[in-house]
Image (tube, helix red, strand yellow):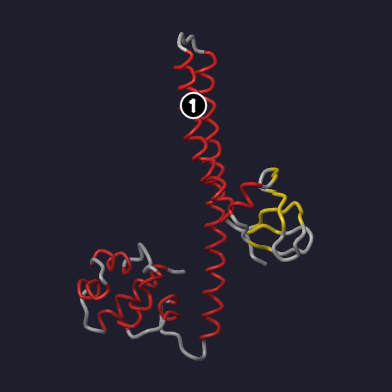
Amino acid sequence: MDQIKIGKFIAERRKRMGLTQAELAEALGLTDRAVSKWETGRSLPDPAIMLALCEILKINVTDLLCGEAVTVENYNEQMEKRLLEMVEEKRRSDRQLLTLEVVIGVLSCLVLMIPVFLGAFLPIASDLVRILIVFSGVIPAFVGIFFAVRIEQIAGYYECAECGHRYVPTYKAVNLSMHFGRTRKMVCPKCGKRSWQKKVLDKQ
């Protein structure tokens, strides 16, 4: 979505309704700084307040997301365009999340390995101190691994090798499954068969 275009449209409609940024913000229970960010294209309104914003500006959500008043003639075209943009944005977001997963995974391994290495090879007189050094890396590493698996679960989809169904599995299913990289052996919720399922970014 074109945030600059949407921002300019919000500003135009606000002025047409005779409202200041502060008045619009107050009506929505926000600060005028939030409205300013929308109008300069630095952020988009939260989905939770879009309906209220549209009601105040006398527009609909389609108009808001398109950054212009959509006529009956170009409604389908604009909706299709918005849907394609949303699909592309999700794909981009999922790709970034999966990159973040790799970074978290690598950092978690380092956080685990460094204290283990230090505990194993440093000349430490006390066994208790050695154990504490080793365990100082275990907890943060497991926290990192938890978040990495969580990211893998929600980013993109898994494709069943048997029926081709693409879906988002539960965290438990992802966490407890055998895996090789991002390919996991899980039960498909559609066909009920267990297969090695690959991670894909698109729903279809």
Residue 26 place in picture, x, y as percent: 22, 72
Residue at the limit of the structure toward the bottom, as seen here? 72
Image position of 174 with respect to 121: above or below: below
Q: Residue lying farthest right? A: 162
Q: Residue at x 31, y 69 (%)?
A: 39
**Image quarter for residue 191?**
bottom right
Horizontal arrangement in the rendering, residue 140 relative to residue 49 (left or right):
right
Residue 116 x %, y %:
53, 22
Residue 122 in the image: state x and y as whole percent: 49, 12
Rendered residue at 42%/79% (across/down): 61
Mark 1 is surrounded, within 10 Å at the Cα level, by few (under 14), some (14 to 19) or many (20 or more) other residues, namely: some
- Residue at figure coordinates x 72%, y 66% from the top left: 190
Tag count: 1
Q: Taking 16 as reference, is 189 left or right?
A: right
Q: Nearer the viewer, residue 185 or 80?
A: 185
Q: Looking at the figure, which quarter contains the C terminus?
A: bottom right
Q: Name which residue lies at 21% across and 83% down.
A: 18
| Above-or-below relation of 144 to 50 | above
| Of the pair 19 and 102, the residue shown nearer to us | 102
Question: For residue 12, which quarter of the picture?
Answer: bottom left
Q: Is residue 48 left or right of residue 174?
A: left
In the rendered structure, which amino acid carries the disc numbered 1? Phe
For this rendering, which residue is in front, 88 or 149? 149
Which picture quadrant has residue 121? top right
Q: Which residue is mark 1?
A: 135
Pinpoint residue 66: horizontal percent, then vertical percent. 45, 77
Farthest front residue in view: 128
Looking at the image, residue 26 sits to the left or right of residue 194; the answer is left
> Which of the two residues, 137 or 12, is positioned nearer the viewer here?
137
Relative height, residue 178 to residue 30 (above, below): above
Q: Secondary structure at mark 1?
A: helix
